[in-house]
């Protein structure tokens, strides 16, 4: 098949391919050089190998940057001959979302990941000193593996990786369109970016999360370096602690940004759904934080080194495992995150094995030589209870991993287990862990390292306990919380906040520099309190607003959370009277104007407009984004669940004709309306009817009711000079035409002709939820992340101090 | 008794209680027949929409009521009732994953997960080519 295709731009793709190969080879070269540098006996040899390693690493970093720039340029210039560009972008894609194309596809995600490793690698080269060689050897071997995901070449009929520069015609070789040399002129537009990603959160959340993922490599690499060189010195611990704090802060931020994105942009009505993809990023964070605590113990007491090593190795392995879970397509039946399988599951599994097995073997090999203490921790020491806390974190991580892995377990062992109601399922047990963690975070700081006496421990805590009890009673009363589990959780959360706050004030004397840990604990406790108050007490105000009796078929427990809003017909919801005012189109989005008014004794005391929007996407159906009114103490959250099709030809609307003979008090029914003839009016008045002398006139007073709306119509029948006239009543927006056709004076029966035209549907079906005190949650998130960085800044300063001392000693 | 023993007991006790708490949340994939035998128990059922039968959704009457006929992997057909809005472009779904329980002969779904045609299907290119041929 030799076709000279027209108008293709192949040079950037070839250059890109070249870069994928130099990135791959550079990483391998760097890994090998750094390996020899780490094992070299003499300083000269170490240095020369290290120089080679740096050259390889820089080659890798520059190549990755080159790949990113070329790919971005191809997206920018809409070169749809490239499959990645065609699949993930389109002509109308705004510039600000072009970067988002990187994290929609698998190749782009690996690219971003490799990019962050490269950035972090420069910091390692600059700061790691004697740890540079072993740490960079681990980092570069990871780059080598990520590079292999991007080269897309065949080794013995097995495709290794998938290149972002593959051409559309190579990707779909069998499509007949590629028989034409001028095929490009028929590909007018790309497939487009998933509308869910066209949201400002999606321009900041994925890069942050990927930086978090990438940064877990460094604690892992330092652990491997420690095991390799058998160096678990103070300096090693400080380096590892710094990177663990950085990683914990960034990964935590990434996870929480995901929650914020889900809340602001997705329409499932919450911020955490225990979706496998969410769990997969939460679990490594939990084990990382467990490792952080045991590492702090090790620094102070020499206990818990083995646990630290295990947790930090596990964290990185879990990151790989979560990549496998989310990218292999195995979660298909359980996750709404639609990642497609690029046929690389096998490669991902090899990737996990490649890191997990050697790390484990190295750990077991060195196990007996690891420094440790034979004496047990004291029961009343801080280190013992911090260790218990770390175990709790690891236990949650274990159970969440187990429950997230059922699709994998089912596949491996032929079992058939699934979780039908994930949110309740996970909440039911994580709530108890959260309670224990909150109480622990408040109490354990008041214990002392290496002591076996409680001393005045209880005395120092009594103030916090007292304040927490008062605060709990107050909050439970204000927020109307009755469930025992919730009250206990609230008490634990408030205790976590108050005990840590008093610790900063009373024990640390308000010294901000050293209070990073307490600040993080306060943040974490605020998150728990925020979740409890906002999610536990959330109120769907669009519920039960229609007082329609649906009959016995519907039980009370049936959730009826959506309400239909006809245009310009107000409905009362909670404290508000809301009206749908119409829509407007902006780009791919349709914005629905929903007016909220709050009344106090018939006077409008507050009015605002919410603009929930939806994309009516051909490929994904309705993709709704909520709009939220933020108050300090609550959020009013609104999203459309369904809208009528917009493109209906008016001539296609169905028209029904009815003829009813009704006497006074009789009723009739059409498809949508029940109609009652209330009365006759012998003296009709109407703009179109001017009474004249000698008229015999009568109007029928008809009441129309559809269960939601009631209105009356008054068609007129009159005889003037022996001539019969009818004055028709119209209800335009409901498509009704009502004609009083005749009356039989003998029986008193009147005949009405009713034309019922299907209306051009102008309504939205929407859901509105009030989240009380959700700002406590966001405040907690920010506080926790700040705490991580406060702690890190302190350790970095400490590291610098030690360095200076070293230099002066020399 | 050593502290590590207390700790071990504590962890084991914790694990047992969590597993007990977790077990009530588990269910399994089933067919309509299996779900019918265990009325009221929650299952997940995978199947396809029976496109020859009517779907019922009239938002004017009730925006929270949608019903349709689904054929499961064994070829059994049941009416499915869902208390929510009809997912847009429901007709185009390939596979439907329902969560819910049988009530008599009707499956009450609490959750519907649709598997829609993947973005990567090749026929999108073919469709485009078809329209191009008409103009050329």
Image (cartoon, rainbow, N blue to C red):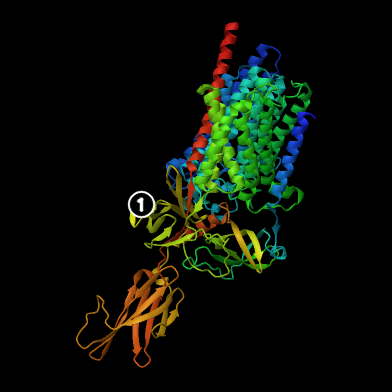
Helix or strand or loop: what does disc 1 sit on?
Answer: strand
Horizontal arrangement in the rendering, residue A292 relative to residue A567 (left or right): right
Chain where mark 1 sits: A
Horizontal arrangement in the rendering, residue A381 relative to residue A582 (left or right): right
Residue A152 is at least partly visible in this image? no
Q: Position of residue B126 (x, y in %)?
A: 54, 57
**Quadrant hosting residue A604:** bottom left
* Residue on which the image places disc 1: A607
Q: How many marks?
A: 1
Q: In front: A719, or A481?
A: A481
Q: In front: A741, or A300?
A: A300
Residue A318 is at least partly visible in this image? yes
Horizontal arrangement in the rendering, residue A711 relative to residue A39 (left or right): left
**Does residue A787 sit above or below A530 in this rendering?**
above
Residue at x 38%, y 82% (from the top left corner): A753
Q: In front: A219, or A648?
A: A219
Q: Position of residue A478 (x, y in %)?
A: 49, 45
Q: In front: A494, or A610?
A: A494
**Quadrant hosting residue A245:** top right
């Amino acid at each position: 098949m030799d076709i000279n295709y027209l108008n293709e731009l192949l040079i950037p793709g070839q250059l890109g391919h070249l870069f994928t190969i130099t990135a791959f080879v550079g990483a391998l070269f760097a890994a090998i050089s750094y390996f020899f540098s780490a094992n070299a006996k003499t300083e000269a040899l170490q240095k020369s190998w290290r120089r080679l390693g740096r050259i390889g690493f820089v080659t890798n970093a520059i190549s990755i940057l080159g790949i990113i720039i070329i790919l971005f340029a191809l997206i920018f210039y809409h070169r749809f001959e490239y499959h990645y560009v065609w699949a993930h972008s389109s002509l109308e894609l705004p510039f600000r979302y072009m970067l988002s194309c990187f994290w929609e596809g698998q190749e782009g995600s690996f690219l971003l990941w490799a990019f962050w490793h490269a950035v972090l690698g420069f910091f390692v080269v600059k700061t790691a000193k004697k740890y540079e060689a072993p740490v960079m050897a681990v980092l570069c071997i990871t780059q080598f593996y990520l590079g292999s995901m991007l080269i897309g070449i065949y080794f013995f009929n097995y495709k290794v990786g998938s290149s972002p520069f593959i051409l559309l015609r190579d990707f779909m070789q069998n499509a007949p369109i590629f028989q034409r040399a001028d095929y490009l002129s028929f590909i007018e537009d790309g497939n487009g970016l998933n509308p869910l990603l066209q949201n400002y959160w999606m321009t900041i959340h994925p890069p942050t999360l990927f930086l978090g993922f990438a940064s877990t490599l460094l604690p892992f690499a330092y652990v491997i370096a420690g095991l390799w060189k058998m160096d678990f010195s103070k300096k090693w611990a400080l380096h590892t602690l710094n990177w663990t704090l950085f990683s914990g802060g960034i990964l935590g931020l990434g996870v929480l940004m995901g929650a914020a994105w889900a809340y602001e942009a997705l329409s499932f009505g919450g911020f955490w759904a225990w979706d496998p993809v969410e769990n997969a990023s939460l679990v490594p964070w939990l084990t990382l934080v467990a490792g952080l605590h045991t590492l702090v113990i090790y620094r102070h007491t020499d206990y818990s080194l083995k646990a630290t090593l295990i947790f930090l190795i596990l964290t990185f392995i879990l990151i790989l495992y979560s990549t496998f879970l989310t990218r292999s397509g195995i979660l298909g039946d359980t996750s709404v995150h639609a990642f497609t399988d690029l046929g690389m599951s096998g490669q991902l599994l090899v990737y996990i094995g490649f890191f997990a097995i050697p790390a484990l073997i190295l750990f077991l090999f060195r196990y007996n030589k690891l420094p440790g203490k034979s004496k047990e921790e004291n029961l009343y020491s801080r280190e013992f209870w911090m260790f218990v806390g770390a175990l709790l974190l690891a236990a949650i991580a274990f159970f969440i991993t187990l429950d997230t892995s059922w699709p994998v377990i089912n596949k491996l062992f032929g079992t058939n287990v699934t979780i039908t109601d994930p949110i309740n399922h996970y909440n039911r047990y994580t709530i108890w862990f959260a309670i224990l963690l909150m109480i622990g975070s408040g109490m354990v700081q008041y214990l002392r390292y290496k002591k076996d006496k409680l001393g005045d421990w209880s005395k120092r805590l009594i103030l916090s306990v007292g304040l927490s009890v008062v605060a709990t009673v107050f909050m439970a009363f204000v927020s109307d919380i009755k469930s025992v589990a919730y009250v206990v959780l609230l008490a634990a959360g408030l205790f976590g906040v108050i005990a840590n706050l008093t610790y900063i004030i009373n024990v640390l004397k308000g010294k901000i520099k050293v209070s990073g840990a307490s600040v993080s604990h306060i943040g974490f406790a605020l998150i728990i309190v925020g979740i409890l108050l906002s999610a536990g007490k959330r109120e769907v105000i669009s519920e039960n607003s229609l007082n329609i009796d649906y009959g016995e078929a519907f039980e009370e427990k049936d959730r009826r959370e959506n309400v239909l809003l006809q245009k310009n017909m107000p409905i009362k919801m909670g404290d508000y009277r809301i009206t749908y005012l119409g829509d407007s189109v902006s780009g791919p989005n349709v914005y629905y104007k929903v007016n909220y008014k709050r009344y106090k004794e018939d006077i409008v005391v507050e009015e605002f407009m919410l603009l929930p929007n939806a994309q009516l996407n051909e490929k994904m159906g309705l993709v709704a984004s909520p709009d939220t009114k933020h108050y300090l103490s609550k959020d009013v959250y609104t999203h459309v669940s369904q809208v009528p099709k917009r493109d209906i030809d008016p001539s296609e609307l169905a028209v029904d004709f009815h003829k009813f003979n009704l006497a006074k008090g009789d009723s009739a029914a059409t498809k949508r309306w029940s109609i009652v003839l209330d009365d006759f009016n012998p003296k009709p008045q109407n703009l179109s009817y001017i009474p004249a002398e000698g008229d015999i006139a009568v109007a029928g007073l008809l009441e129309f009711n559809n269960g939601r709306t009631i209105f009356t119509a008054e068609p007129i029948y009159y005889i003037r000079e022996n001539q019969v006239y009818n004055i028709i009543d119209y209800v335009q927006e409901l498509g009704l035409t009502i004609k009083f056709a005749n009356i039989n004076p003998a029986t008193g029966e009147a005949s009405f002709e009713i034309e019922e035209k299907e209306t051009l549907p102008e309504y939205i079906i929407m859901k509105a939820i009030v989240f009380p005190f959700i700002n406590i949650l966001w405040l907690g998130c920010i506080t926790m992340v700040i705490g991580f960085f406060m702690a890190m800044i302190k350790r970095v300063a400490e590291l610098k101090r030690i360095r200076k001392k070293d230099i002066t000693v020399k | 008794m050593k502290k590590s023993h207390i700790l071990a007991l504590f962890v084991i006790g914790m694990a047992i209680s969590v597993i007990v708490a977790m077990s009530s949340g588990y269910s399994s994939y089933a067919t309509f027949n299996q779900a019918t035998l265990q009325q009221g128990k929650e299952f997940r059922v995978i199947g396809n929409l029976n496109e020859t039968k009517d779907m019922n959704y009239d938002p004017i009457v009730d925006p929270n009521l949608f019903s349709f006929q689904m054929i499961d992997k064994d070829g059994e057909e049941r009416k499915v009732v869902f208390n929510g809005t009809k997912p847009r472009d429901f007709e185009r779904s390939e596979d439907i994953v329902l969560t819910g329980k049988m009530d008599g002969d009707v499956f009450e779904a609490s959750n519907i997960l649709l598997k829609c045609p993947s973005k990567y299907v090749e026929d999108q290119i073919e469709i485009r080519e078809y329209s191009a041929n008409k103009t050329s």
